[in-house]
Image (cartoon, rainbow, N blue to C red):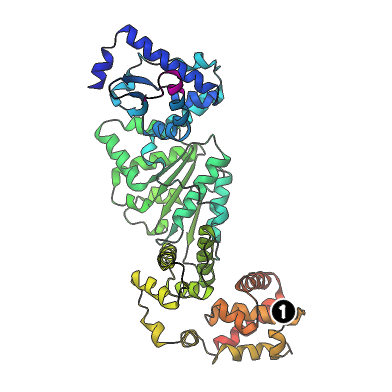
Amino acid sequence: MLIDVVQNYDSEKKAFLLDIWEKTILQLSTQYDHKKIFSFLNKTWIVNIDEHEKSVYVWVANEFILSQVKKFLAKWIKEAIHAIYNPQFDVKFVIYTPFNNWSDLLINLKKLLNIKENNSITSQLMHENIKQEFSEYLWILFDPNFRFDNFIIWWNNNFAFSAAKAVSENPGITYNPLFLYWNVWLGKTHLMQAIWNDIIQNHPKKVVVYLPCTKLIDEIIDGIKKNKLSNLMTKFDNVDVLLIDDVQILSWKDKTQEIFFNIFNDFHSKKKQVILTSDRPPKELVEIEPRLKSRFWFGLVADIQAPDFETRIAILQAKLDTKQEYIDFEMLSIIAKYIKTNVRELEWALNILLTRKKLSWNWELTDNDVLACLKTLWYNTQEWFTQTNETINNSNTKNIENFGKLVEMVAQYYNISVNEIKSESRKKAITNARQILMVLGKKYFKRTLEKIWDYLGWKNHASVIYAITNIEKKIKHDQDMAHDYNIFVDWIEK
């Protein structure tokens, strides 16, 4: 075994390896920040030089340190060793557990780099050590591309989005715990990662840990089996923000619930942030202790529902913008009409369509390509061939023969003509009539954006979205507007 070989090094061999590593560190220090060198290489050394294989073996403590060394320092370490020892030798990084408590080849980096002890370094090292402890799960969630600024907001996820944003700005202070629940594939991963990314960027001293509930259970069971539960609790003592995903999995696990109850209470009493997700609200969590469910209500409970048609279009368009691709709006509309409750499937359908586009050498896509993608995802698209869009849309009308009849009623009410509603006039009465029709067309007649703007002569769907948002705000704060709106609703619902 390697440790047997190393333990048999004589003093001359040890001095030789120490000298090579010391010179490597000094070479690094001329090009790299001393504190980062100390953070990543404090417990790292050259463990062996194999002349036969022409390899220099550098030992690192664990997978987390290995990932950071490869990401930030590997290139510089290799160049330094090539310059100091031999440019023909390869440099290999190894993890070997028996060396964890062996220090004969360890260099005092603080003294070598003249780093004075201070609280910031101690804090940073503690931060890194806790990350190392949870390194197996730490990067499951992490993706820097998921941020608040590219999260698509719709009317029935805005509350959850605002709560998540508030928590990320003041972790432990605002809404603690934050309990988010929703059905599958409605943007949970994006929102969780946005919280994560925002906190680690704006609160770099916070130790943020994400654990799927299954992994939390594994940690607790392992701690019980090995009689090391106190070690797990000590690890959590140093965590500032804890994200637990799919907490409903705790059902029926009495002992695990008891331990998590203690972890939760400790976090809450120390004003450390807890963020929980579930597929249902706390009151519907079966076989979870009432005292634990009551804790979930301490802060804020928010849900996310399925996005409406306009939002599904916006999600697809945002994905295209990220990929710097273009697909005709009509084709996006087909996807959005079929996929109504699954944001992840929207992206899957888009990826399939883009792949077809690429494989066909960017030839122009057709409706049949879109329908083929939907069929791949097990959507029944037969109705597309037997019904026109107008037939499908008209089947959704309520109690008034069609949308055109409502337009005539609204025009008569405001003493204006239908042509004026369709014009570009910005007179108050015409603008109010036009915007109310957009809201009613969307809500009661299931009119798609393109149908609304086609009928009213607007240039693009963004204008329609803005108008709908604007009128909905007006209805809440303008009594006259609310009065008019309710009259038209009464007409429709008679």
- Res 61 seen here: no
Q: Is residue 418 magenta?
A: no
Q: Is residue 203 left or right of residue 87?
A: right
* Residue type, numbered disc 1: Thr
Quick one: 21 or 391, which is closer to the camera?
21
Q: Is residue 87 magenta?
A: yes
Task: Using the rendered view, name the quadrant where residue 448 is placed.
Answer: bottom right
Question: Looking at the rendering, in which quadrant would you find the C terminus?
Answer: bottom right
Residue 400 position, x and y percent, is 55, 90
Q: Residue lying farthest left? A: 1
Q: Residue lying farthest right? A: 427
Q: Which residue is mark 1?
A: 431
- Res 1 seen here: yes
Position of residue 114 relative to residue 417, above or below, is above
Q: Please give the name of the residue rendered at 50% of the width and 74% of the height, measured from the top-left corner.
A: 333
Quick one: 212 or 197, which is closer to the camera?
197
Position of residue 233 relative to residue 255, above or below, is above
Magenta stretch: give its range: 80-89
Q: Residue lying farthest front? A: 88
**Label 1 Cα crowd, 10 Å radius (few <14 / some 14-19 / many 20+):** some
Regarding mark 1 in the picture, which secondary structure is present there? helix
Q: Residue lying farthest top? A: 11
Question: Looking at the rendering, in which quadrant would you find the N terminus?
Answer: top left
Quick one: 329 or 409, which is closer to the camera?
329
Q: Please give the name of the residue rendered at 58% of the width and 49% of the height, measured from the top-left corner.
A: 166
Position of residue 267 relative to residue 365, above or below, is above
Residue 451 position, x and y percent, is 56, 81
Residue 357 position, x and y percent, is 44, 67
Image mark count: 1
